[in-house]
Each structure stands twice: as C-alpha cells, then as structure tokens.
Image (cartoon, rainbow, N blue to C red):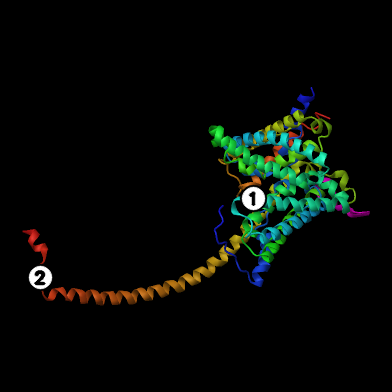
C-alpha cells in the first residue's frame, strides 16, 4: 500500500470518537471479524485469566505504539516505515515484558513465548499501518484502545468457554499471593481435556465464529426485511410520483411532437430526398 | 540418533502450527490452494533455516555484551533485515526461485513462526539447540518442514471443501478452523513419542 504524499487526516466528532472505540470491539473485532492475531488467540485462551492478561498486555502495546506511530507519522519516511513500526512495537513489548516479569511473574510464566511474540502480532502492525499512520494522536490512541479491548474480549470469551469445558473451573488465576476463581463442584473430574489442547482451541474458535456469523446474518436479515417493508411504502410513493411525472411529460411531449410535425408540413416538401431515391 | 529425534520432534511431535500455534496467520490465510501453500511453505523453510543461524550468532553477541534483555528487538531487526537481504539476493542471483517465492517473502517478516523458532532455539528446547549452531539450524529447517506439511494438508482439505455444500455461517474461516482442529487432534497422537 502506498501512502499519498499528503496524508488525509480524518476529523472525528465526539460521537465519531466513541464509534472508533466500539468499532474495534464489535463491528470489526480483530479476532472474529478481521481474523488477525490468531496465534496468541488460540494459544493463550486456555483459561480466561491468561486470556485477560494477554489481551491487556497487547492493549497496552497497541495504545502506546499507535500513539508513537501517529506522533512520528510525518517524520518516518515512507520506504522504511514497516521496519520503523516494528522497532517501535518491539520497544514497547520489551517494556511490557520487563514489567510483567517483575510484578506479575505468574502471568509472565503462563504467557511464555507468546509475550515476546506480541511483536509480530498482526493486529498491532495492521493498526499502525492502516490507522495510526494517517490519523491524529488522540484518535489513534482511541483506535488502539478499541482494537485492544476487542482482542481482550475475544480472548476472555474463548478462555471462559475452554476453561469451563476443558478444566471445569471458572476464571481461576492468581495475582501475587491472592488466589481467585471458582471450581465448579465435581466438574473438574468430568472435564473434556481436549478443549485445553490445541485441537480444542481451533474447534472453539471455529464454532464461536460460526455462531457470530449466524447471529449477525440473522440480524442483517431482520434489518433487510424491515427495510424491505419500509422500502415497499417508499416504492409505492415513488412509483405514483414517477407515473404522474411521466404522464405530464408525455402530455408535453405529445404537444411538442404535434408542434414539430406541423412545422415541416408548412413548406419544403419538394426537397425531400426520399422521393429522389425512389426514382 | 539425537539428530533423528530432533527432526521427528520438530516436524511432528512439536508441529509448529498444530501443536504450538505458531504461524497461524499464514496457515489460515495462504492455504486456499495447494500450490500457493507449497510456495509459502518452502519460503518459510528457507527463512527459518537462515534465521536460526543468524539469531543464534546474535544471541551469543548479546550474551557477550550482557544485554540479553534486548533479545526481542535484536531478533526482529535481524529477521526483517535478513528477509530483505534474501529477497535482494534471490532477485539478483536466482530469479527463478525468486519468482516462485517472491510474493511470500515480505509476509514472512510478520510470521511469528520465524521469531518463534529463534526464541525457542535459545529458550525452551534447552541445551541441545542452545549450544550447537548446527542443531539450531536443523531445528529451524525441520520446524519449517512441519509448517509446510500442515499448510499443504490443510490446503488439500480446503480445495475439496470448496466443492461441498457447507452451512452458510460456517463458510470461510469457521469450517477451516474446524478442519484444522481435527488435523491437530491427529497430530496430538504423536505427543509422548519423544520424552
């Protein structure tokens, strides 16, 4: 994609700003709609707590990198922008990595290799390229926040499902010395371990995605039907209007035709080439 | 024997895509046709092999300088530069190979399998790959081969799925994910082969 020499900045109203955030969470949710960032989504969503941690870590990186990319959008030359973005992202990932290791070591261990791999999470690079590189700092931060929260929501949703089916617990985890979460009676004894295995990750995401498609299809259909009914009324009105117009123009046209026909009949009948050719 | 175990481990037991969720984006994105999948797979083998060697050397430098915490930044820079370099060299000296792999090379920079193998070589696989450059290289190449096997299989499945009637909400990604899930289940059977 080539950026134009004069990047166009979109101006957003207050309502538009709210929409930037909700857009990332629902309408173009990075996981369910844009299908970006699959690796951490599938790997980390074995429990809701890990999903939350991963989501928030990615959100922090996303907001910071969007802000910096947006600030530097007029400084970074077009040709080296991708390496520059990657470097910015890598810097923030390293910071988050260090902070987590110091303050929440349990989460640091649980995220493992996927923490440094936030660098190559396509969501972050995609938002830097598609949004932050052409928009104002404030809007870019909001976009990062929306996308990050959308990612977090998706991870927590998948995490809750997989944790419940795969280990029979709900939101277990530990923060420092504090343990929390609910173990649901005897459920852990009857859990289906496949859901915390990779196979369960693919399956859960596939099924959730299909469910979301089905729901949004249904909503779209309902909206279309509503539009159709309204549309029929409007069509009727338009048709009547058009018919009236047509009738009027026809009348005018008829008048004009009569007028034109009456004109040539007045004189040059003898110069008509038709008569000569027939000879 | 250690080499053999490493190869089998990298290709099947710890298959990058199906058992470790590395490189899922190209796995799902570039698996519509078998020939493009093969192209992507070969490009990944190529870059992962070279990247394993260079990041291993860079890690030694970082350790010598006492700045291991810059690992992530250093690795991603090395990989990005390497991909660019490989692209240029291929264009100049092997135009045939370039025209076959060219499109896929830039995509590989953001393929987490490459950064993943670089980090895993040093961290989790422990002593064998961390100490021997050759083992690292082998691990890179055969992890890439594992990726190629997975993406080729999925592309074959998707080509056949295209001619079948799939329920509407499942069309596209969802049914692909379900297929990947069944493949992953099959690969789970390899686990425990190597302790």
Q: Nearer the viewer, residue A92 or B163?
A: A92
Q: Reading the chain from its start, which is encountered first: label 1 or label 2?
A: 1
Q: Nearer the viewer, residue A6 or A120?
A: A6
Q: Which mark is residue A82?
A: 1
Quarter of the picture holding the N terminus of chain B = top right
Q: What element does badge 1 sit on?
A: helix
Vertical position of residue B35 compared to residue A152: above or below:
above
Q: Residue furthest right?
A: A177
Residue A98: % across, % down = 83, 51
Residue B31: % across, % down = 61, 40
Vertical position of residue B93 compared to residue A105: above or below:
above
Residue A46: % across, % down = 80, 47
- Over which residues does the magenta segment extend? A164-183
How many tags in the picture?
2
Camera sees residue B19: no
Discs 1, 2: same chain: yes
Magenta stretch holds residue A165: yes
Q: Residues within 10 Å of mark 2 (few under 14, many from 20)?
A: few
Q: Residues within 10 Å of mark 1 (few under 14, many from 20)?
A: some
Residue identifier under label 2? A269
Mark 1 and mark 2: Cα distance apart in space: 78 Å
Name the magenta segment's main secondary structure. Answer: strand
Chain letter behind tag 1 = A
Vertical position of residue A22 compared to residue A43: above or below:
below
Camera sees residue A120: yes
Quarter of the picture holding the C terminus of chain B = top right
Residue at x 56% of width, y 32% of height: B93
Magenta stretch holds residue A272: no
Residue A11: % across, % down = 61, 69
* Of marks 1 and 2, the one in the foreground: 1
């Amino acid at each position: 994609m080539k950026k134009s020499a004069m990047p166009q900045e979109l101006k957003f109203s207050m309502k538009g700003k709210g929409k930037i955030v909700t857009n990332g969470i629902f309408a173009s949710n990075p996981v369910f709609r844009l299908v970006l960032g699959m690796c951490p989504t599938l790997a980390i969503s074995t429990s809701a707590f890990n999903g939350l941690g991963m989501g928030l870590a990615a959100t922090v990186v996303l907001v910071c990198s969007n802000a910096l990319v947006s600030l530097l959008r007029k400084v970074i030359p077009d040709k080296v922008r991708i390496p520059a973005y990657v470097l910015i992202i890598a810097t923030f990932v390293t910071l988050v990595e260090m902070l987590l290791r110091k303050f929440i070591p349990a989460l640091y261990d649980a995220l493992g290799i996927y923490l440094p791999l936030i660098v190559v999470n396509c969501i972050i690079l995609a938002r830097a390229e598609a949004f932050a590189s052409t928009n104002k700092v404030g809007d870019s931060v909001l976009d990062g926040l929306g996308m990050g929260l959308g990612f977090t929501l998706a991870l927590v949703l998948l995490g809750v499902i997989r944790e419940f089916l795969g280990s029979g617990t709900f939101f277990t985890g530990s923060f420092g010395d504090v343990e929390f979460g609910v173990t649901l009676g005897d459920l852990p004894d009857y859990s289906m371990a496949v859901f915390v295995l990779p196979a369960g990750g693919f399956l859960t995401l596939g099924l959730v995605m299909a469910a979301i498609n089905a729901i949004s299809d249904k909503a779209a259909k309902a909206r279309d039907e509503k539009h159709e009914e309204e549309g029929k009324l409007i069509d009727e009105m338009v048709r009547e209007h058009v018919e009236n117009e047509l009738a009027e123009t026809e009348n005018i046209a008829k008048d004009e035709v009569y007028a034109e026909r009456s004109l040539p009949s007045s004189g040059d009948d003898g110069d008509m080439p038709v008569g000569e050719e027939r000879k | 024997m250690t080499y053999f175990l490493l190869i089998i481990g990298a290709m099947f037991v710890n298959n990058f895509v199906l058992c470790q969720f590395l490189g899922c984006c190209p796995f799902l994105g570039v698996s519509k046709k078998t020939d493009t999948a093969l192209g992507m797979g070969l490009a990944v083998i190529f870059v992962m092999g070279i990247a394993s060697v260079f990041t291993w050397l860079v890690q030694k430098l970082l350790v010598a300088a006492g700045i291991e915490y810059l690992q992530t930044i250093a690795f991603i820079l090395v990989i990005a530069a390497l991909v660019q370099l490989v692209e240029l060299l291929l264009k100049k000296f092997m135009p045939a190979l370039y025209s076959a792999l060219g499109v896929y090379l830039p995509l590989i920079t953001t393929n987490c399998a490459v950064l993943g193998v670089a980090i895993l070589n040093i961290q989790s696989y422990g002593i064998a790959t961390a100490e021997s450059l050759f083992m690292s290289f082998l691990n890179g190449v055969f992890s890439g081969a594992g990726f190629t096997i997975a993406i080729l299989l999925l592309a074959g499945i998707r080509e056949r799925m295209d001619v079948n009637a799939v329920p509407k909400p499942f069309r596209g990604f969802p049914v692909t994910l379900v297929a990947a899930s069944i493949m992953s289940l099959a690969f789970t059977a390899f686990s425990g082969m190597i302790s």
